[in-house]
Image (tube, grey):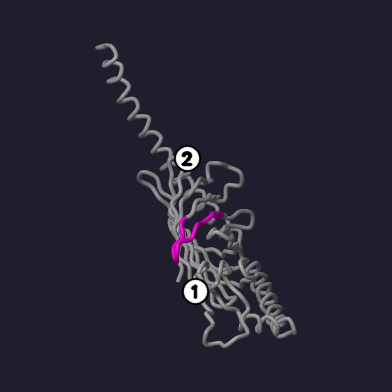
Amino acid sequence: MKALCIILLLLLPLSMIAAEDEESEGDEKILETIKKIQEEAEEEEEDSDWDDDEEDDGLCGCLLEGCFELLDSEFGELFWEYMIYISFAPYPYAPSADFNFSSVDYGESASRKIASIQASADLSTHFDRTYGNTNRLTAQLSSLQLNVFNQTIFASSESLSTFSVNAGLSLLIGSFDLSCYGGTYLFAPTGDIMASAGLSSRIFFPGRLYLDVYSLYAFLSSSSGILHLITSLNFAVWRFSVGVGYNYNNFGGGGDDDYIYAGPCVKISFWL
């Protein structure tokens, strides 16, 4: 019995040291990730010049001009008409709307809901002694979408945060929506600001279940970027919903696990 007690007393400090080492591994991974992003941003800044900026401005100008011409065409007229008559359910599983989230309503405009807002937060564990908190706000005005993304990845003493604002267009068909958007992205530890773009989709099933998929890509350099991908299956109760899913984040490391933070998540949402 005494021998067993002595063994336990010897193992206890060792287990505490092992736990501290595992926690420090998470902190080291975060610090390495911040260092990599900073190096990539500095290299991109050194490689860029005024000629590249002028080419980018010309490309953006051509894209904008093409968009305006498209909206001024017959397709544009159909699109504006589609936008005018989109109507949202009070919330996705409101008793008056079955499980249809949106419809094209040609009735009286006074009874039409043209905006929808969803706020959500999730917590994830990454199996590498790091954890994540992601907050999203999605505002829908007819087929126009604005979404705000904020994420913090943390360990025992270190953390990194990102923030992004994006706007775009949505295709809304009953219990399905698909959105594409672009905007700006801030990597808070270094203060680097970059362009971002992404796709998202929500599919509403019977039984108060819906699938939510959100992706966002930030253009760190000409050859690398930061990718966020969140998928969750959610169950709705009145205006609230709870869900489980998977959160994947790749900070410019390609297939290198040293810069990937991924794992299961739990999520809560609220609809306005």
Q: Is residue 248 magenta?
A: no
Secondary structure under tag 2 reads: loop
- Of residue 71 and residue 92, the one placed in the foreground of this image is 92
Total numbered badges shown on the rendered structure: 2
Element at label 1 = loop
Q: Please give the range of residues in magenta.
A: 228-242
Task: For the C terminus, give its image quadrant.
Answer: bottom left
Residue 207 appears in view: yes
Q: Is residue 31 left or right of residue 205?
A: left
Residue at coordinates 61% horizontally, 81% vertically from top-left? 105
Type of the residue with mark 2:
Phe
Where residue 243 sits in the image (x, y, percent)? 48, 54
- Pointer 2 with pointer 1, Cβ within 8 A: no
The residue lying furthest to the right in this view is 74
Quadrant of the image containing the N terminus: top left
Q: Residues within 10 Å of mark 1 (few under 14, many from 20)?
A: many
- Disc sitting over residue 246 in the figure: none
Helix, strand or loop: magenta stretch: strand
* Pointer 2 or 1: first along the chain: 1
Q: Which residue is mark 1?
A: 90
Quarter of the rendering containing residue 8:
top left
Q: Residue 262: x percent and y percent?
A: 52, 46
- Amino acid type for the residue under numbered disc 1: Pro
Residue 253: % across, % down: 57, 47
Q: Position of residue 209 (x, y in %)?
A: 54, 58
Q: Is residue 189 above or below residue 11?
A: below
| Disc 2 target residue | 127
